[in-house]
Amino acid sequence: MTVTSDTAPGASERQFTWGHGALDAGFTTGPDGVLRMVRLARPHPRVSSGAGAFTGAPTTGSKTGSEAGSKATWTTGSGAEAASEAAAESDPAPKALLPLTPAPQAPAPQAPLPLLELTALGHGSGWSGPRFTGTALGARLRYRGHITREHEDWTYLTAELHDPATGLTAFVELSSPTGLPVLRSRVRLRNEGDEPLVVQSVSSLLVGALPSPDALDVHRARNDWLAECRWYAEPLRVTVADIHAAAHQHDSRAAVTLAGHGSWPTDGHLPMGAVTERGGGRAWLWQVESPAGWRWDLGERAGSAYVALNGPTDAEHQWRVRLTPGDEFTTVPGVLALGSGLDDAFAALTSYRRAVRRPHPDHRALPVVFNDYMNTLMGDPTTEKLLPLIDAAAAAGAEYFCIDSGWYDDSTTGWWDSVGEWLPSPRRFPDGGLQAVLDRIRERGMVPGLWLEPEVVGVRSPVADALPPDAFFQRDGLRITEQGRHQLDLRHPAARAHLDKTVDRIVGDWGVGYLKLDYNIVVDPGTCAPGDIAPGAGLLGHTQAYLDWLSEVLDRHPGLLIENCASGGMRMDGATLAVTQLQSTSDQQDPLRFPPIAAAAPTAVPPEQGAVWAYPQPGFDDDLITFTLGGALLGRIHLSGHLSRMTERQLALVRNAVAVYKTLRADLAQAVPFWPLGLPGWTDDWLALGMRVPGDRASYVSIWRRGGDGELRLPVRHLAGREVRTEVLHPSSPLAGSARWDGGGLRVSLPRTPGVLLIRLTSET
């Protein structure tokens, strides 16, 4: 796949390429000295990243960006200072300068977009409009030079740009995992001038020269509470109309824009998007890795589409940062994956997410977790209620048992606005206290877990008065209160010390090995602590400090598992996903409405990290029990339900499903997703999710039927033309349904609704 836009060579033009075997980028400067990306390509587009992602893929947990050092080679523009800086920071592993590209064949009607766009007070847009392109500063940043390097299965390029008028220097830090058609970018700004500069927006990644909007469909994902990961598509021309630009000598001002706000960054939409080429099959898929605000724009320039990825901005999020001389700021990363189709691009992005995250044994082990909350104790745990559940969960095959909310509540008036001390309730746990319950979990061969909402302190909690005022979110000198709670600011040492003491007590003293960290309030636009000039900047600072704190907790307790939750999937962002081991996908309680969430969750999170509820109940018939269990088997199964009240026949259904999961979880840890019926719709009668294992030695397909005809054919294109053996792994009853391979797909029969099948496909050739 290639993305190209050529410019006429000028006297001062410089051209270079950068990349590896799965990604090739071309750059050029024109007479204005502005650096532009004019090509982004997959050198071997016929090789699907669904398979290619398994060969030469980067080591899980490799460092990215400027934190991973290696020997660098400098190509001079006009700046020699950065060359000596790079040499001082390097280590031995030289990389040759990448070759120059041939001269462009034909000029474009307009120059492509610059590599970077940003706005600052006194230096706004170069033209009127709501987009973050065509900025005055972006057009003034001159190319100084670049360095390239390789380290730990990653390839890096850092381009240095400089604005002589303000003294602002920008380092555009591009990186890519070797073997994957994925580009990651972030920008580091440094004020080398004599006066302060207040930055209002800065792009993390800007890619132009995509195909014409005439040929593109844009894909977005609604992400609402209890209705997460709902992808939808429409032609780009629905928003970006063809205005006959030649007649006006100007591009359209229209753009598809999407933004996330406040402390729930994925409330409303996922921080993702994609375009697919109608008829051509190519796909470009992106994500903004921000734990706070974000925005992306998709528009038109010179007859081609472009995408601009941003973190928080002044206009959208009340974000600004003041750079005094010598100060630096680094953006959140933006990521773009290329694919021969949407499934192919998601496969590449899944492999990238594994490469960029913090290493942890859980990513390979995938233990089965039982959580007492969903449709079961619902925040009302006691010793009497828990002990039979613990025994039943162990008998069903659970390996972790998490006590959810309420374990700290010793009042009779509710705990919502009194949390913060995180001490166990004597009333709920008599005769040995909570420790006796944790011991029972261990006696039954499971690891104990607890729910915690670390960032909030209830207004009635003693902690609200014990910590200093600056340890909390504030605006105009007043402490922020949301739903009877205050929000800790993890940049403050007292807030951090309070949580360190809490976690070290729970994990270190009590022996808890699993923390479900929830977050159930929304603060928008953020906080203005001393030193913040805008609340959006305070919010970004806190959320980044929170992720740093999580990393420090895992450094101290390397065996600990952390589940990220915010009323389900309201914090399902790439930055948090790279630190925590599991991600809650939803709080949806209806087993008939969970399948479209479960089927689409791998668009946002690798399958081994996506926690999917399976909450069978004694009042369900066998079909509904197997339905709710089957929906979680290609994710991270999270058991719940009143197992202790079930009949032996019902418990056998649960045990069988858990046993099936344990046979395939090693494959899930390295598989990439595909969707035989396309991405699921919220009301679809039939839904399907597939997983491809490296080398296509095995594939798995989960199929749900909620209505419609009882038979359906599903294409499985990567196995078409092969001899394939099919096995129905779940349910165990032969009367539940059947599947037959017809040479290019599966012919499936599910005679009753609700119905589910999990099928293993093994290629015989």
Image: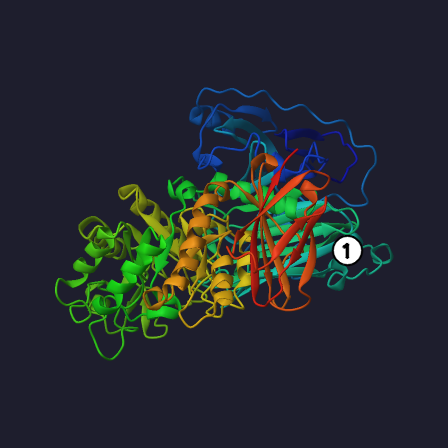
Residue shown at the point (67%, 60%) measured from the top left: 256
The residue carrying pointer 1 sits among few (fewer than 14), some (14 to 19) or many (20 or more) residues within 10 Å by Cα, namely: some
- How far from the left and from the top, in percent, is residue 545? 36, 51
Quarter holding the N terminus is top right
Q: Is residue 641 left or right of residue 406?
A: right
- Could you say where residue 215 lies in the image, as x and y percent from the top left? 79, 52
Q: How many labels does the image show?
A: 1
Residue 196 picture location, percent across and down: 47, 49
Residues 167 and 262: in front is: 262
Position of the C terminus, as image quadrant, is: top right
Which residue is pictured at 20% across the width and 48% down the height?
A: 508
In this rendering, is residue 587 above or below 66?
A: below
In the picture provided, is 174 more to the left or to the right than 650?
right
Q: Where is mark 1, residue-wise?
A: 251
How far across and how far down the image is residue 709, in percent?
Answer: 69, 66
Residue at the bottom extreme of this rendering: 413
Q: In this view, does 642 lie above or below 274?
A: below
Report the amino acid beneath label 1. Asp
Please, what secondary structure does the residue beneath circle 1 have?
Answer: loop
Residue situated furthest left in the rendering: 431
The image's colouring method is rainbow
Q: Is residue 314 left or right of residue 462?
A: right
Q: Depth check: 116 or 221 in front? A: 221
- Name the residue at 48% across, 44% down: 664
Please identify the residue farthest to the right as the structure is shown: 247
Q: Is residue 187 visible?
A: no
**Front position in the image: 531 or 658:** 658
Asked whether residue 387 is in view, the answer is yes
